[in-house]
C-alpha cells in the first residue's frame, strides 16, 4: 500500500511541478492572486459557512454601493415583507374591531401598529377604543394598571407612553391635568420609574423613560398638548433625552435599570432607546448609530425571543415586581433601520443582510398565526416601519 501511495505522489508531483514553475515565473501580482485563490479554496473546504457569509456580505455591500442611499432591500425580501405585513395587519385590526380581551396597554399597542401618519378621518374602532382606554384610568390620573380589572394600586408609568403614542396616531389630545400628571412622575435627574410609587434612584427605569419621552414627543409634535403646557413638556423631553444619553453602559447599549448593579444590557430596550432618541432629538446620533450597527449579532433573534427577568423593587415602601418581558426583534429591527443611514458601505451591507435574515425568519413569516395580541402588534409596528423606510 505504501508503494502505491508513493507512486501516486510521484505522479502528482510530475503534474504540479511544471504548473508551479510556470506560476513562479509570472509577476508578483499574478502570484498574489494565485495565493489568495488557493487560500479561498482551502477555506471553502474547511469552513464553507464563512465563505458563504462573506460572499453574501460582498454582494450586499456592492448593492448598497450601487443604491441611491435608501434601504436597498431585494425585491424578494420586499415581497415577503409586504405579504407578512398584510396578513399580520388583518389580525391586529380584527383585535381592534372587537376589543375582546384587550387592556389599555394592548389597545395602545394595536393602535400604534395599524395607524400611520396623520389620517383625515378616524378609523371606525377609534372612539370605542379611546373610551375603553379612558374608562380604565385610575382616578383620572392618566395612569393605568397592567390589568385594570384587578384590585391593585400598581400603576405602570410606561403604559401612558404607549397610550400617548396611540392618541397621537388618532389625533386625540390630552388635558393639561393629564399632561401635568405625566410630568409630575419625572424625577429631577430626568428619568421616570416603571411603577409610580417606586421612586428610589436605584429603580430609575430606562424602559419607562424611553416610552414616556417617545409618547410626549409625538403628542407635542402633533400639537395635541396645549400651548400652555408646551414649554414644560419640551423641558421634560429634553431632560429625559439627556438622562438616556448619559446612562449607556460601557458596551454602548442600555440596561433596563442603569443604577442597579445586577441589571444586564438589553438589546430590546437599547433598540427602543435609540428609536426614541431618533424621534425626540435626532441630532448628533451618528456615533450611537454606528455603535449599534457594529454590535448587531451575527444572526437575528426569532420573532418569539424575549428578554426580561423578575426584578424585585423593594426600596423604601411596598415591594413591586417588574415581570415585564421585552420582545427583542421588533425594536432591534426599528433601531437598525434608524441607524442604517449613518453606516459606511460595509456596515450598511451587513445591516442589509441582517434585516433580510430577520424578515425571512419562519417565526416572522407565520406570526399572524399566534394568538398573543400584544406580541403581534409590536412585530407589526416594526414590519410597517421597515416597509415605510424601504419604500423611500
Image (cartoon, rainbow, N blue to C red):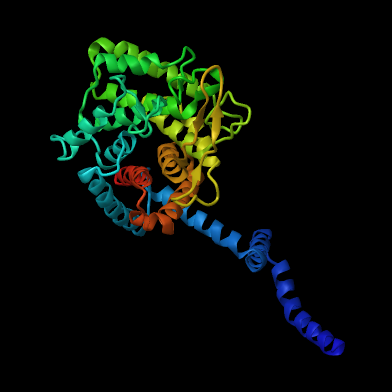
Please give the name of the residue rendered at 54% of the width and 41% of the height, measured from the top-left corner: 294
Does 250 sit left or right of 338 as displayed?
right
Q: Is residue 333 above or below residue 76?
A: above
36 or 163: nearer the viewer: 163
Q: Which quadrant of the figure contains the C terminus?
A: top left
Residue occupying image coordinates x 40% and y 40%: 334
Q: Nearer the viewer, residue 17 or 159?
A: 159
Q: Position of residue 296 (x, y in %)?
A: 53, 44
In the visual, does 125 lie left or right of 283?
A: left
User: From this viewpoint, is residue 292 visible?
Assistant: yes
Farthest residue in the front direction? 151
Viewer-proximal residue, 53 or 190?
A: 190
State which quarter of the image contains the N terminus: bottom right
Q: How many marks?
A: 0
Q: Position of residue 138 (x, y in %)?
A: 31, 23
Left or right of 219 on screen, residue 66: right
Where residue 117 appears, as percent x and y from the top left, is: 23, 35
Residue 282 visible in image: no
Position of 3 relative to 375 (above/below):
below
Amino acid at each position: 500500500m505504501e508503494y502505491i501511495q508513493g507512486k501516486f505522489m510521484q505522479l502528482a508531483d510530475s503534474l504540479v511541478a511544471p504548473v508551479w514553475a510556470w506560476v513562479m515565473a509570472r509577476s508578483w501580482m499574478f502570484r498574489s492572486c494565485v495565493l489568495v485563490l488557493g487560500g479561498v479554496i482551502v477555506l471553502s473546504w474547511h469552513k464553507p459557512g464563512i465563505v458563504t457569509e462573506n460572499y453574501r456580505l460582498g454582494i450586499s455591500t456592492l448593492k448598497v454601493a450601487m443604491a441611491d442611499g435608501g434601504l436597498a432591500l431585494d425585491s424578494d425580501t420586499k415581497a415577503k415583507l409586504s405579504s407578512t405585513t398584510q396578513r399580520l395587519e388583518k389580525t391586529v385590526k380584527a383585535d381592534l374591531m372587537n376589543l375582546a380581551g384587550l387592556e389599555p396597554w394592548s389597545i395602545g399597542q394595536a393602535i400604534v401598529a395599524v395607524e400611520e401618519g396623520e389620517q383625515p378621518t378616524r378609523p371606525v374602532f377609534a372612539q370605542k377604543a379611546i373610551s375603553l382606554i379612558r374608562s380604565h384610568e385610575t382616578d383620572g390620573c392618566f395612569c393605568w394598571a397592567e390589568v385594570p380589572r384587578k384590585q391593585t394600586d400598581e400603576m405602570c408609568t410606561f403604559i401612558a407612553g404607549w397610550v400617548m403614542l396611540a392618541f397621537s396616531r388618532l389625533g386625540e389630545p390630552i388635558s393639561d391635568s393629564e399632561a401635568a400628571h405625566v410630568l409630575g412622575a419625572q424625577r429631577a435627574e430626568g428619568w421616570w420609574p416603571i411603577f409610580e410609587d417606586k421612586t428610589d434612584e436605584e429603580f430609575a427605569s430606562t424602559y419607562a423613560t424611553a416610552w414616556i419621552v417617545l409618547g410626549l414627543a409625538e403628542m407635542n409634535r402633533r400639537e395635541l398638548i396645549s400651548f400652555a403646557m408646551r414649554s414644560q413638556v419640551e423641558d421634560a423631553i429634553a431632560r429625559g433625552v439627556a438622562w438616556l444619553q448619559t446612562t449607556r453602559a460601557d458596551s454602548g447599549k442600555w440596561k433596563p435599570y442603569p443604577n442597579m448593579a445586577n441589571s444586564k444590557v438589553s438589546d430590546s430596550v437599547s433598540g427602543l432607546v435609540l428609536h426614541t432618541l431618533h424621534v425626540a432629538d435626532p441630532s448628533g446620533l451618528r456615533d450611537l448609530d454606528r455603535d449599534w450597527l457594529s454590535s448587531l449579532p451575527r444572526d437575528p433573534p426569532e420573532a418569539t425571543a424575549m428578554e426580561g427577568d423578575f426584578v424585585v423593587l423593594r426600596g423604601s415602601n411596598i415591594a413591586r415586581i417588574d415581570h415585564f418581558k421585552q420582545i427583542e426583534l421588533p425594536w432591534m429591527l426599528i433601531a437598525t433601520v434608524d441607524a442604517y443611514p449613518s453606516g459606511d458601505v460595509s456596515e450598511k451591507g451587513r445591516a442589509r443582510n441582517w434585516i433580510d435574515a430577520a424578515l425571512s425568519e419562519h417565526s416572522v413569516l407565520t406570526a399572524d398565526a399566534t394568538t398573543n395580541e400584544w406580541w403581534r402588534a409590536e412585530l407589526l409596528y416594526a414590519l410597517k416601519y421597515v416597509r415605510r423606510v424601504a419604500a423611500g
